[in-house]
Image (cartoon, helix red, strand yellow):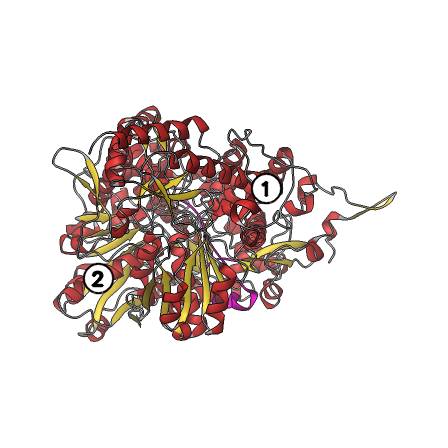
Amino acid sequence: MRYLPKSPSERREMLDAIGVQSVNELFESIPEKFRLRAPLSLPAALSEPEIIQYFQARAAENSKGYTSFLGAGVYSHVRSVVTDALVQRGEFLTSYTPYQAEFAQGTLTAIFEFQTLMCQLTGQEVANASMYDGSTALTEAVLMAERITGRHRVLVARSVHPEYRHVLQTYAKNLGIQIEEIGYTESGQLDRAALRKESPEQAAAIVVQSPNFFGVIEEIPALAEVAHASGALLVTGIAEAVSLGIVRPPAEADIVAMEGQSFGISPSYGGPYVGVIATRDKFVRQMPGRLAGQTTDAEGRRGFVLTLATREQHIRREKATSNICTNEALFALVATIHLSLLGKEGLREQALQNLAKARFAQAELEKIPGVRRAFSGPSFNEFVLEFPRSVKMVNQDLLREKIIGPFALGTHYPELTKRALVCATETTPRAEIERLAAAIRKILDRPV
Amino acid sequence: MSYKSTEIESPVGKILKAREHVSQNEGLIFEKSAPGKRGMELPPLDVPAVDASKALGKEFTRDAVEGFPEVSEIEVIRHFTRLSTWNYAIDLGMYPLGSCTMKYNPRVNEFVARLDGLATEHPEQPAEVSQGCLRILYDLQKCLLSITGMDAATLQPVAGAQGELTGLLMIRAYLQSQGNPRKTVLIPDSAHGTNPASVVIAGYEVRNIKSNARGQIDTDHLREFCTEDVAALMLTNPSTLGVFEERIAEIAAILHERGALLYMDGANMNALAGVTRPGDFGVDVMHLNLHKTFSTPHGGGGPGAGPVLVKKFLEPFLPVPVVVKKEDGKFALDHNRPQSIGRVRAYCGNFGVLLRALAYILAYGPGIRQATEDAVLNSNYIRKNLESVFDLPYNLPSMHEVVFSDARQKKNGVNTMDIAKRLIDYGFHPYTTAFPLIVPGAMMIEPTESESREECDFFIEAMRSIAAEAETNPQLVKTAPHSTRIGRLDEVAAARKPILRWKPEEGGSR
């Protein structure tokens, strides 16, 4: 087998050196009745070309040749071949968590850079590296708020990504955390009147997302005021991180939970991505996840180490801030390289292009009779349209035109079956936006 | 703060020039930044431009991100390439970190994960245009069920620790459906720290149980501890000592008699694949670490994947969605599962990691047993060649890893960490130090199947040489490493006054 570096005679010599007749003797501590006598029932071994063929065949069964207008938490953005070339260096790809700092300064330095970039973007003082993704980052941010405030009630906007809320429910269920959901207004933003009725004074946190699941930007400073007036923390989720190129960062929030997929990470049918928690310095000891800190060696040379490990499971066990161990370090590196390439001007230009494409798409689609913009709040690269009929039916027809239509909000919001969440990014060609508009016009022209 | 390595005396005064190699002086990316540089350009906008503050309102917009790097493409390439040279990696040599299973990460797996039509797929796209992704998930599930002898699987958890939590939540949901979720989960003192941390998030209390003199579960103790309150025992098998629990059947029987479940932490599955199946020896629920046994790259700390495998009676409680094959042969995601614990992560988990693991399994087929045999062979070979030099606290049959202690070297003031750091000078990554906790001064060595006899011999020589140095020149060992770009770092200072991000005033001078 090509991955195994031993000849039969080397195996024999090693067995002789150990002093056993057969390799089976090394497994005698397993009770005999549990030892397999037959080979496992697995497909026969494949050579490298056959493995490639298998996966190429699977790729051909997917959406090649389709244009997509899906966002809803996962975005198609530019990526440079440089990023992929660098992260495929074996020294990054095949190294372990950098516990042995002298031998892992590459990873540690990059983590420190990642933490810095995330602080600059979010307007927060400290960021970890890393959480699994946006959904678990948001969940851990809520658990963190509960520890900080000692309160067990959480007010969560319904406009937070539905799957993020679902993950939060799963985690919170057995921890005595009570979750109450707050609705949205016609602007698509959190309903502040409803929020005030829910007496935030007993809440650990108010949890919003911005831009939210409807693509609408929330009024973070005002929400922070409501939260802080009642001693609650404001937790802000971000699913579309490119927005931070032009959208005001949630600096007033106490904890920011971000999905970093937009920073050079391919959609890959749901993962791996990279989650981040950013917060204020004063909360750092309640924060989960890895942190790299700057220090020096005996000769005064700058270096980086994993630090504040007394928060973590390998030291604190059941008293740790989280059970997280393996995280998404390689994708934190992807984001770091990607953002280094894109730089200050590039990120701003990319964000502006997203805004322009989405505004163009909105204008084109609003021209279709019976289609209107829903939710009046300011939006970035996603916006909601109301169709005169079920979005799911329209999308079925679009699929025949090789278009993966906008996200049907009815999937998660029973009251919004006619509303569609449209996404356009810098990678969406104008011609495809025009094709989408023409296709929807044609579909809606036909009687149901 | 000054950085001595970057400043040297020259005939023209102090200069910022290389001493050994320019890459040894590499600063932070922010320190290379200058206004107007960039490393990536976008195609021109093909729709009318929009003014952000007019479109969104001034109160919702920002100026350019303060402090963000401005560097060119070549500077990015050089910076990260130089950083990479400061890392050790499996691609460079043996990485004998016990419990971490640092094996070869096949390159073809990287290739297929990046294919157009796989890397490009959106998790919300309809099943009609996702059949390839769904089939990959389905095929992987089938393979993992075959390897473990379990009945049903979820691929959603994205790390071992998340797999633990998922399994515990399923145990809880099952027991709740029987009328009482119970209160406590038993954990041996040799367990990974993630086990107790996961137990707490699942809403259970941890009760630690002591290992016996043989480092194994004391079944008399287990009988005593396994009261009506106990929901499950979380057992790592083979244990973190690299030893198979010989009384596994009895352990399972004790738990099952009292209505408790057996959870197996599959972190050490690399000792078992193709040789024995947890489903056959009484395990009710387990997780696998695909970034260990199934070769997906650890990437400096992740990503991973922690699929959970269960017996039939736990199937209704799997997280949503579940990948199913319909009667017409098409694949789909089933969300309609009323007894499900819910979701533990958005979408279907780390698909890109899952497909790499499938590529690994397809490369071996049933021959995966040979990998297991070679892993156990390597660990026993190293043990045989080092047991005359290092203390072996538990003289039991080793499987994929062997745990020594620093007891003999400690007499000269040399501890496990010193020996580990000195290994770096011999060109090896250190083994795992100070774990498991039941072995004071533990030296936990897991070579994996990816090492040739020659590499094992080099490692053995290095360890023997360090043992000799500990006798003749302990100071040399205690101050190691001597060959790296920087020496041992001041971790106490790092934690006392944390510097967790770059600021111009603190790191600006080169």
Which of labels 1 and 2 is toward the front? 1
Circle 1 packing at 10 Å, graded few (<14), some (14-19), many (20+), is many
The reply, left or right, for residue B474 in relation to residue A404 is: right
Image quadrant in which you'd find residue B82: top right
Label annotation for residue B179:
none
Magenta span includes B272: no
Question: Which chain is mark 1 on?
Answer: A
Tally of numbered discs: 2
User: Pointer 2: what residue?
Assistant: B171
| Residue under numbered circle 1 | A340
On screen, residue A448 above or below B89: above
Residue type at mark 1 is: Ser
In the rendered image, residue B235, in percent from the top left (x then y), is placed at: 27, 61
User: Is residue B54 depicted above or below B409 in this figure?
Assistant: above
Residue A22 as seen in the image, left or right of residue B403: left
Q: Which x, y percent locates residue B270?
A: 32, 47
Give x and y (percent) for residue A382.
42, 43
Q: Nearer the viewer, residue A144 or B288?
A: A144
Question: What's under tag 2, amino acid-wise?
Answer: Ile
Label 2 CA crowd tier, 10 Å (few <14, some 14–19, many 20+): many
Residues at marks 1 and 2, CA–CA distance in whole angstroms: 45 Å
* Quarter of the figure with the N terminus of chain B: bottom right
